[in-house]
Amino acid sequence: MAKEIVLLKLGGSLITDKDTPYTPRLDKLANLALEIKTALDSNPNLLLILGHGSGSFGHVAAKQHGTREGVKTREQWLGFTEVRFQAAELNRHVVQALMEAGLPALPFPPSASIVSDHRVVTHHNIETIRRALAANLLPVVQGDVAFDESLGGTILSTEDVFKFLVEKFSPKRVLLAGIEAGVWEDFPARTKLVKQIQLSDYEKMRAGIGGSASTDVTGGMKAKVQEMFSLIQKNQNLTVQIFSAEEHGFLTRALQGENMGTLLTA
C-alpha cells in the first residue's frame, strides 16, 4: 500500500492554558502523544507531519511587539527574538512529550528555514523534512517568527506553514485539533455542530462563523475556515477536518479516518 501523508496541527489552545501566559498543559501533551503513537502503530502506511500553535507562549510576546504586522526597528527585532524564544520553549515541551511516548520527533522551526513575502512562504528548505519522512521520523513544525521580504520579519501561523507543505507534499488530509468541537452553525451558543461543509455551501455560511475567545494574533475560526477553503480550492483532493481533541481517543480516531468534528471538502 502507498504511504499516506497527513498534516496534523495541535492548536495552541489545546496544548497550553491560553489564559495563563507560558503555561503548557503537560498532562494533555502526554495524552496526545500517546494517541498519536497509537494511530501510527495501527497504520504503518501513515506518515505524519505534526505542527503546533503557540498558545500562551508566542502570542503574548507577539501581541506586545506587534510582530505579525512587521519588524523594522531595533526594539521590534528584540521582540522578534523574544517571540522565537517563547515558541521554542513550547516546542521543547511538545517534542519531549512525543519522545517520551516513544516517537522519533524532530523539530523543524520555520524561523531557521523559511522566508515569506507578506506571510506567504516563498523559500523553505523542505529537503530535510523529506529525508526525515523517508527515515520514518516525525517532523514537527510550528507557529514561529520568520524573515519576510516585505515586512522585515513576521509571525507565520502553523496554517501558513501547512499551506506551503500541502503544495510540496500533496497530502489528502489536514487535521486541525483544538478545543472547539468544530464549526458551529450558531456560535457562541454552540448547539448545532456542522458535520460537513462543501466549498459551495461555504460561501452561503460565511457570514455566521465566529472569531476566537482568547488572545489570538492569527485570527480565530473564521480565518481558519477561510484559509482552509482557499487551500481546498487549489487542491480538490484535499479534505480538512476541524475537531476537538479534548476528549481522550478523539485524536486517534481522527488520524484513523473518522470525522470527529467538521469536515471541509471540495
Image (cartoon, rainbow, N blue to C red):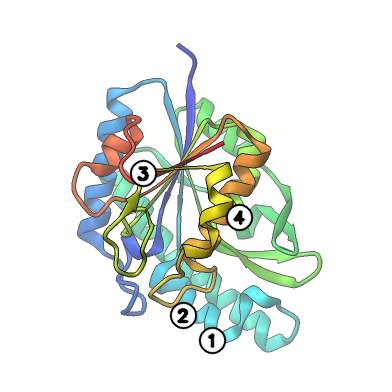
Residue 63: give x, y in percent of width and height.
Answer: 53, 82
Please report contact status of discs 4 and 2: CB closer than 8 Å, yes or no: no
Q: Which residue matches tag 2?
A: 60
Front: mark 2 or 3 = 3
Secondary structure category for the residue under label 3:
loop
Give me the C-alpha separation between circle 3 and circle 4. Answer: 24 Å
Of the residues under marks 3 and 4, which one precedes in the sequence?
4
Q: Count up the numbered dots.
A: 4
Q: Are marks 1 and 4 in contact (CB under 8 Å)?
A: no
CA–CA distance between discs 2 and 3? Answer: 33 Å
Q: Is residue 156 visible?
A: yes
Which secondary structure, mark 1?
helix
Q: Which mark is residue 160?
A: 4
Cα distance in 3D space between marks 1 and 4: 21 Å
Point out the tag, 2 or 3, that comes first from the N-terminus. 2
Closer mark to the observer between disc 4 and disc 2: 4
Give whichever of 221, 174 is nearer the camera: 221
- Residue at horizontal 36 percent and vertical 75 percent from the top: 22
> Are circles 3 and 4 on residues that touch, CB within 8 Å?
no
Q: Residues within 10 Å of mark 2 (few under 14, many from 20)?
A: many
Q: Is residue 76 left or right of residue 85?
A: right
- The residue beneath circle 1 is 64
